[in-house]
Amino acid sequence: MQANGFNLKAHLALVFVNLFYGINYVVVKEATPEYLSAFALVGVRVVGAFLLFSLLYQFFLEKEKIDREDIPRIIACSFLGTSANVALFIKGLSLTSPINASLIMITVPILVLIFSAFFLKEKLNSLKISGVILGALGAALLVIRTSQTPGASSLLGDLMIFLNASSYALYLVIVKPIMTKYQPFTVLRLLFGIALLFLFPLYYPALSEQSFSTIPLNAWWAIGYVVIFATFFTYLLNIFAIKRVQPSVVSIYIYTQPIIASIIAVLSGKYGLQWEHLAASVLIFAGVALISK
């Protein structure tokens, strides 16, 4: 089926991707920063995912040759969609709350629009520009609220999550030609293999200093979830969807993440919703609605 038609399998894949990600906002906090440093978790996540993708690629898939002209794009995709995405998300989430992080991440469709206009020369009308402004106001409200409120959230954490959203949005814009040309496991193995090199200065010292014997069982379960569900399955299902639908469709499903994350965060009893969360949600969702018209 063509990318601009309705592809049920692609949409189901995106449902599970965002379910896994929505849960991940709360799960990550069970491991870091209390039991595992953020960059140690980055190392475990990247190494674990690379090994899983490599095993499947080695034993079950036909080998593919990568065209030389695609190598710069693959390196850029690895930096934006794997290295920066993983490092900024884990470190940012270790500093801020799951609710703040999930709300900031729904600026991705707005950022996809901006990058598409810049790199793909897509035209912006007055409605879309208004949507960008509303979304920016919503994100700014969260950042201002965080900067004035001590506790579970931090301004640096929010800013890192926003940079993560920006890198992921640009990744969605530039990755599609690669995904439509090669097998998913071929691309993912390369993306995570290159990320191992990019992130080595961050995770190697952290892993060297980490005491794994003191990590409790609940944190190990969280680490396992991050590697298997929030990395291996999410990247695989996301690529499956990107091959079949447009980047804007992929980004739209991010709207569900704050709902899932907020429900789980509140039920856990560790986090609460504030009026700023609700006001920011209204502004960001209104912005997304305008850019979707």
Image (cartoon, grey):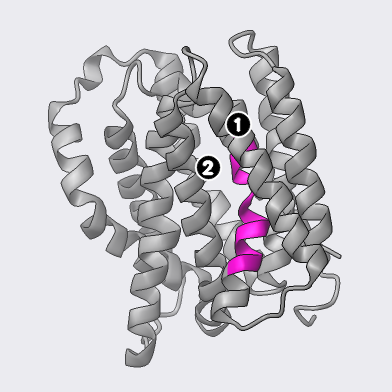
Res. 223 visible in picture: no
**Mark 1 and mark 2 in contact (Cβ < 8 Å)?**
no
* Image mark for residue 209: none
Q: Is residue 169 left or right of residue 49?
A: right
Instruction: Indicate which disc residue 142 carries.
Output: 1
Residue at 73%, 48% (x, y): give it. 134
27 w.r.t. 129: above or below: above
Q: Position of residue 238 (x, y in %)?
A: 60, 59
**Residue toward you, 222 or 136:** 136
* Residue type, mark 1 in image: Leu
Measured along the vertical axis of the image, is residue 64 above or below residue 109? below
The quarter of the picture where residue 191 lies is bottom left
The residue under the point 68% across, 80% down is: 122
In the rendered view, tell whether residue 36 sits above or below residue 8.
Answer: above
**Residue 270 picture location, percent across and down:** 58, 10
Q: Which residues are magenta?
A: 102-114
Name the residue tied to disc 2: 230
Q: Quadrant of residue 224?
A: top left
Q: Is residue 106 magenta?
A: yes
Which of these two is toward me, 12 or 58? 12
Q: CA distance from mark 2 to mark 1?
A: 25 Å
